[in-house]
Image: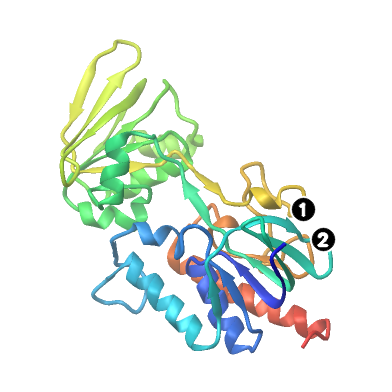
Amino acid sequence: MSSNTHIKCLIIGSGPAGYTAAIYASRADLKPVVYTGLTPGGQLTETTEVDNFPGYPKGITGPELMEDLKAQAERFGTEVRFGMATKADLKSNPKRIWIDDTTEITADTVIVSTGASAKWLGLENENRLRMNAGGVSACAVCDGFFFRGQDVAIVGAGDTAAEEATYLSKLCKKVYMIVRKGEMRASKAMQYRVQNTANIEILWHSETQDILGKDGVEGVVVKNSQTGELRTLDVTGFFVAIGHKPNTDIFKGQLDMDDQGYLLVTPGSTKTNIEGVFAVGDCADKTYRQAVTAAGSGCMGALDAERYLAANGIH
């Protein structure tokens, strides 16, 4: 191993949760170190306009917002390092984390803010239009506003897809819901709500074949799996709601998590099942998944870490 460094407060991940935790931890003189992961700034760095984060009345781009949060954390003394946690031994005391398989870190407290990654269909044009802000999104609550009065499509059949379709129906003229099977996985209540919303049209037994458009979404080609019929939907927005995967694999067998991999915390706190380890942001939140809620939980994580250190006489 190339080096061994001891840290009072180690923050794994650099999204809104990680950087907010760093701001609070550094102001409490915990001398936090943030390891950014492979995507410094997290999911927001793939977003263009962010209009719903408090304090930015004219909006801001995702990358700019994350640079602001990073600069604020660094202003108070946070050390930000590029690197990815690849292995963890959280049951030892102090905790042991390996960065990029080569550098071993020990820490008195660990704040896990590794986030979650949206699942995508894997279409070439989906990726191109997503990366170029061309109208492909995995968050209707984040981006639905930009499609007010327009026709959009959403793919998915679970509660999240149903909720987002309902949300979009209040903003958009028409919402096509693309469902792969002849039934939905969503709860009966959510199915009823979708099926009784006049401007939502459910396309059963349907799969997305392609997304059309050069600089933005201009249409979606859908195939009916029973008849083989191809249909082009005249839409300007395409939302993918087939789930998220929390980035928590390295903590399996140590931190309690649900069957999807989301970390479980004591209600009303960020405490995990291991003392001195706290989980914040999207890796522990499958309900809200917003930048502002992630930032709020990051604040909580830092306060929980500060109190843990004080209670254990670690200065």
Q: Residue at x 34, y 79 (%)?
A: 55
Residue 101 visible in rendering: yes
Q: Label for residue 134? A: none
Residue 296 visible in rendering: no
Which quadrant of the view contains residue 237?
top left
Q: Which residue bears the numbered disc 2?
A: 91
Q: Total label count?
A: 2
Would you call the spot at circle 2 few (<14 residues within 10 Å), some (14-19), or many (20 or more)?
A: some
Mark 1 and 2 residues: CB-CB less than 8 Å, in contact? yes
Q: Which residue bears the numbered disc 1?
A: 254
> Under tag 2, what secondary structure?
loop
x, y (%) of residue 290? 44, 61
Which amino acid does the dot numbered 2 rest on? Lys
x, y (%) of residue 273? 77, 60
Which amino acid does the dot numbered 1 rest on? Gln
Q: Nearer the viewer, residue 84 or 128?
A: 84
Q: Residue at x 22, y 49 (%)?
A: 134
User: On screen, 132 above or below 312?
Assistant: above
User: On screen, 153 above or below 91?
Assistant: above
Which quadrant of the view contains residue 90?
bottom right
Q: Residue at x 34, y 51 (%)?
A: 140
